Every structure is written in C-alpha cells, then in structure tokens.
Image: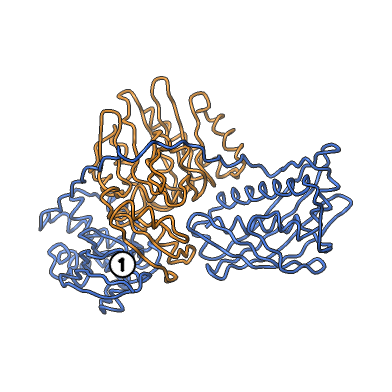
C-alpha cells in the first residue's frame, strides 16, 4: 500500500492504496464517486475522462499513486461549473445522449473544447471528440450541443497555459559516450548456413537440439511427432511465456519439415496458432539454404499492440538468431542428441520463434 | 482488466531514479499513456515502476541558436500549445497536435514516447527525420545518441540498464528548409498504419517512413524517390502489397506537403 493525498472535488483526501489501483477505481470504489465511468480500461473509449490538475485525463490509465498531490475533479465536482451547466442544458435540448454511459467523459471533453477552442467549427469539434466513443447518438446531437454552447461565448476566462521551466544544464555529467549499439541484422526468410545440408537436416530432426538453439525456448516433451514446450520472451515492457504443443512432420526425400502448433500465454491471456514450414536447399557441398515460412493467428490483448508487421519482423529475427546458434552448434563439432528423439525440430523452433515473435511483439 | 500488482516509487532526484531504474524488473514510467494500457491488459508486468515525470532534471526546455532541447517529460500538449520555442514552421507543435487524443496528450511525454519506441509513434519517425539526438543519463555518466542509433526496432531502444532519457535536442530548421508530415489512421488518434516525414533543404533531403514492423526506414537524397522507397520497403520484406501501397501514398502526400 502507498499513501497518497489528493484533492477530490475540492476536498483533501488521504488514503492508502495499492499501487496498481487506477484513479477511476479509487474514485468509484473508495470515494463512491460513480459518475466516472469505466469502458475499455485501456485509454481508448474516453468514458473515464475527468479533470486532473485542470486538464482532461484518462483516469483508467492514471494510477492513483502517480497522482499524489494532484487536483482531481470528477463529473460530480462540475455540478456548479458554468460551462458544464450550459453544456448540460444543451445536451438535453439537442438529444446528445441516450444511454448516458459516455456522457460524463463527453461533458469533460466538451468543456475542454469550449474553453480551449472557442472558435472551433464542426470539423474541429468532431476531431476533438475522436477520443470519446458514443454508441448511441452518432455524435450528431453532441456536436450540435457543443456548437450551441460555443455560440454563446465564454462564461469564464480560458485557462492560461503554464510556462515551462528552463531545463537544468546538462554540462556537468561527464563525457559523451560512444555509440555502438549493434544494428539489428537485415533479415530475410531465406537463411544461409555454412554447413552441409545433410548435417543441417540431421540436426533439425533432433527437437532438443533445435530447442536449444531458439532463444528462450525449452522443450518439455517429445513423443513421436508431438512436442510440448514453452518459450519465454520479451518485447519492450511486454513479457510473455507461451506454453503449447505442436505436431511435426518430415519429408526426408525433399528435406522439408512442417510444424503446426498452438500456444497460450496464461498471464496475458493470449492465444497463438501457428504453422511453420522449412525447406532445405543444398547450395554446394558446404552450404545450405533454409527457406522458412510462417503463418500465425493471435487472439487476445496482445493483438492491441501486435500489429502484423511487428510480428513479422520479430519472427524473422528469431529465425536468424536460431540459424546463427545452429551454425555455431554444428560447426563446433557437437552434433545432435544426447536424447535420441526422432522428431522434427526446425519446425519446432520455427514455431518457437513464432511464439517468441509473438511474445516480443507485445 | 486491472494491472497485476507492482511496486511504485517516485524518486526525487535523477541519480536516485537511475539507481532504481537499474534494478531487476524495474520499468521507468513517465506519463503512462502507453505503458498504462499495457499494464491494465497485463501485457507488461514489471515488479517496480519508477515514476520520473516529476523530476526537475527532466522538465522544461532550453534553446540556443542551433537547437531546441526539450526535457524528456514535457507533455505532447505543452508542445502542441506552443510552450517550447519553435524550431521552424511550427513543426513540433503541429505534429504534437495529432498524437492520440487531448486527454492522452495532457499526460503523455515526448521522452516516454521515444523510450516506449512503438513503431507507430509520431515522435519516433519525426525526430529521426529531423536528425534529433537524445541525451541519456546512466549509472556510468551521460551520453548522446542520434535518433537513428537510439531507436533499434519495435519497442526497442539503445537504453542500457539504469539509463534514463533526459532530454531531446532538436536542430532548428534552416530558413530554406521545407517539411511535410503525413500518417494514415483508421480514425484520428488511432495507431497509424503508415507514416512519412519529409525534410527538404538545399543539399540535404531526407524522408523517414514509419509505422513499420521495426525501426523506421530512412531515405536520403537520391534514394528519396518512389522507386527508392519501394526498393527500401521491399528490402525489409515485411509489407504486403496493400501496406506497401499505403506507405507510398502517405510518402507522396508528405512530399506534396513539403513542396507546397
């Protein structure tokens, strides 16, 4: 628990709160100010918008501890606000609400438009409303109501912007460091190994060896063509641990392998279905090309951030580091298997890297 | 969803923040407008949040004849409202105004956005096009990096453990410079699906394409043609035909704005 002191609608409030409690929950559950509504809880819908130090903010992604000392004004605290008074009347007249769920957030945003943009036209009003979702009105009534209040002129002086302080000097902090920071490799899906194709194929058929070459991967079970395992990965602040199983198949004649699997990250509630295929091509006696193809579907919260291109980039990157590890392993003279399991791995690792990609994706 | 439990510390000095940020499981937290959703969705589950947006060392702005230096915790709204000196064409203010929504801009910070390094973030692409540099403070002292070296991929930067972004130095635009910025979003404020920033000056042309899977693509001088752009995007091999087309259209619009 952390102790915070806030001013809520003019009243000083001190409370012990768990750091993970966001401001909207604090107001609703601890202060019983249920006018602040929660919709999406990740900053998209705008229902929880309130005034934080005088400016509109999302209370669902503002943690209470991070607001220590702040001045909070909820819809309940705007009852006597002259702008909100006019807006309330205009919302009623213009049918600017139906179910009312979005209305507290709408009024806070509308007040901001009136105060900050007194000359706003309809297009600008609609632009400013982009961050507040309403599923009833089609916004027509809301826009009308705001235009009506704008046409009445400002009842109170607009807030003056607070000037920024001068940035403290940074002269005293030692020498400027050298850059380095390795550039991520340029990646394609055709990966090259300086190892004979027969050796690569033999290695790929050992799932444990393959798993070792995949960063973050661990194979927990390999029986026949079925594999179980997990992949741990991180992308920026996002950390995932996907557990799953997969089925592999090998075509020894053409040196092609395929793995199809499903994984689940119980922490983030994300599901991944993936299929990976690899085909080896002998370039010459000493060199092999591995063509890797991956398809996948992601379901769950991670998809909020895991845009397709990001997933692709990470999966190819994992493929690259897998191949580098495999190359190192094979040219080190240590060849396959302490455990002689005859299952395909490349696919597995492709799956892994997929999973991984997924993970990092976040 | 509710965030998983975490600890929270609001250090009172940069030195203390650097020490805390180097701890295992720590995550630096400024406005929380990107990290907050990830915490609520439990995609991110750090052990400790180190809140830096009240540190005086990260607040404010300084300017000289060549550049404007913006504290990492200056909000997008402050920039949009003209609280920092103009580098030319009102550029930073106009970019800031298109970031997410006003309530998000009121809390979100320019430094937080860069450190989060979402490929679809406006500042990642724009500040790379302006050849801005970042000033980092870590346990072993300070260093500066150019934006193109700082951003390493999707959600990845060159920040080392314990390092904190302190300020961003943005060169002023030469009087003769021209500028265009464009992005494609499903709706205003949404994540961009395509993005381009174009900087033209006599002897130096640069276009940066963002909202990709990894770090933005920089096209300079002769490479700054539709053919050059197509080749560069095909080289990174991550775009389907529709997205490639979208990026080219957005680049074309950014170029048209710069030449207008």
Residue B36 shown left or right of residue B105 in the figure: right
Q: Residue at x 49, y 63 (%)?
A: B43
Q: How many marks?
A: 1
Q: Which residue is more in the foreground, B202 or A241?
A: A241
Q: Which element is circle 1 on?
A: helix
Residue A247 in which image quadrant? bottom right
Quadrant containing the N terminus of chain A is bottom left
- The subunit letter for the residue under badge 1 reads A
The residue at 35%/47% (across/down) is B110
Give percent across and percent down for residue A292: 72, 49
- For residue B110, side relative to residue B154 (left or right): left
A233 lies above or below A21: above
Colour mapping used in the image? by chain
Residue where numbered disc 1 is placed:
A65
Q: Which chain is blue?
A: A
Percent x, y of residue A88: 19, 68
Q: Residue A348: where, in percent of width, then height? A: 73, 59
**Label 1 environment density (alpha carbons within 10 Å; few <14, some 14–19, many ≥20):** many
Judged left or right of residue B238, residue A104 is left
> Of all residues shown, which one is farthest toward the top?
B203
Please, which residue is most extreme toward the right here? A253
x and y, in percent, of residue A7 in the image: 19, 69
Query: Which color is chain B depicted in?
Result: orange
Vertical position of residue A360 compared to residue A173: above or below: below
Closer to us: A295 or A109:
A295
Residue placed most toward the observer, A47 or A55:
A55
Asked if residue A183 is positioned above or below residue A258 in the image, the reply reads above
Q: Is residue B224 above or below residue B92?
A: above
């Amino acid at each position: 628990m952390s102790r915070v002191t806030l001013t809520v609608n003019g009243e000083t409030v001190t409370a012990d709160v768990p750091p993970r409690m966001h401001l909207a929950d604090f107001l609703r559950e601890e202060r019983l100010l249920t006018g602040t509504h929660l919709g999406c809880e990740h900053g998209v819908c705008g229902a929880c918008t309130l005034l934080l130090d005088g400016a509109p903010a999302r209370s669902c992604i503002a943690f209470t501890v991070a607001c220590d000392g702040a001045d909070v004004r909820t819809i309940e605290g705007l009852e006597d606000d002259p702008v909100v008074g006019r807006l309330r009347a205009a919302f009623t007249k213009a049918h600017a609400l139906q179910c009312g769920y979005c209305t507290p957030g709408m009024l806070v945003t509308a007040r901001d438009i009136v105060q900050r943009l007194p000359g706003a036209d309809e297009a600008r009003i609609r632009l400013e409303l982009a961050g507040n979702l309403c599923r009833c009105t089609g916004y027509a009534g809301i826009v009308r109501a705001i235009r009506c209040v704008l046409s009445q002129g400002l009842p109170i002086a607009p807030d003056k912007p607070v000037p920024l302080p001068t940035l403290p000097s940074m002269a005293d902090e030692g020498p400027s460091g050298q850059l380095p920071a390795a550039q991520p490799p340029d990646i394609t899906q055709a990966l090259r190994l300086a190892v004979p194709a027969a050796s690569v194929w033999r290695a790929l058929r050992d799932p444990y060896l393959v798993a070792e070459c995949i960063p973050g991967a661990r194979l927990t079970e390999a029986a026949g063509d079925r594999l179980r395992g997990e992949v741990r990965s991180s992308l920026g602040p996002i950390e995932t641990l996907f557990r799953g199983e997969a089925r592999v198949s090998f075509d020894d004649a053409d040196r092609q392998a395929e793995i199809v699997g499903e994984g689940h990250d119980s922490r983030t509630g994300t599901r991944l279905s993936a299929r990976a295929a690899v085909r080896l091509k002998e370039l010459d006696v000493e060199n092999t090309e591995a063509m890797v193809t991956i398809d996948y579907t992601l379901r769950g919260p991670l998809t909020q951030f895991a845009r397709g291109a990001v997933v692709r980039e990470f999966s190819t990157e994992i493929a690259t580091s897998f191949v580098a590890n495999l190359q190192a392993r094979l040219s080190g003279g240590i060849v396959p298997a302490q455990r002689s399991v005859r299952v395909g791995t490349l696919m597995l690792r492709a799956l892994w890297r997929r999973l991984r990609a997924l993970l990092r994706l976040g | 969803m509710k965030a998983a439990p975490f600890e929270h510390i609001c250090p009172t000095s940069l030195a203390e923040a650097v020490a805390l940020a180097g701890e295992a499981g720590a995550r630096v937290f400024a406005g929380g407008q990107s990290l907050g959703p990830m915490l609520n969705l439990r995609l991110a589950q750090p052990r400790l949040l180190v809140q830096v947006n009240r540190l005086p060392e990260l607040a404010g702005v300084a300017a000289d004849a060549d550049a404007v230096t913006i504290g990492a915790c200056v909000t997008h709204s402050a920039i949009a409202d003209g609280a920092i000196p103009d580098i030319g064409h009102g550029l930073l203010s106009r970019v800031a105004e298109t970031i997410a929504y006003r309530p998000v801009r009121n809390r979100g910070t320019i430094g937080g956005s860069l450190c989060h390094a979402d490929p679809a973030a406006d500042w990642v692409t724009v500040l790379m096009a302006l050849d801005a540099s970042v000033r980092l403070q870590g346990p072993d002292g300070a260093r500066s990096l150019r934006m193109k070296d700082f951003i390493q991929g999707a959600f990845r930067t060159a920040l080392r453990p314990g390092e904190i972004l302190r300020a961003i130095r943005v060169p002023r635009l030469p009087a003769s410079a021209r500028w265009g910025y464009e992005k494609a979003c499903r709706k205003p404020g949404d994540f961009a699906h395509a993005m381009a920033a174009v900087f033209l000056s006599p002897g130096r042309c640069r276009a940066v394409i963002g909202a990709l899977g990894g770090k933005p693509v920089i096209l300079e001088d002769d490479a700054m043609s539709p053919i050059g752009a197509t080749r560069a995007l095909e080289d990174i091999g991550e775009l389907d035909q529709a997205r490639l087309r979208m990026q080219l259209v957005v680049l074309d619009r950014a170029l048209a704005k710069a030449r207008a």
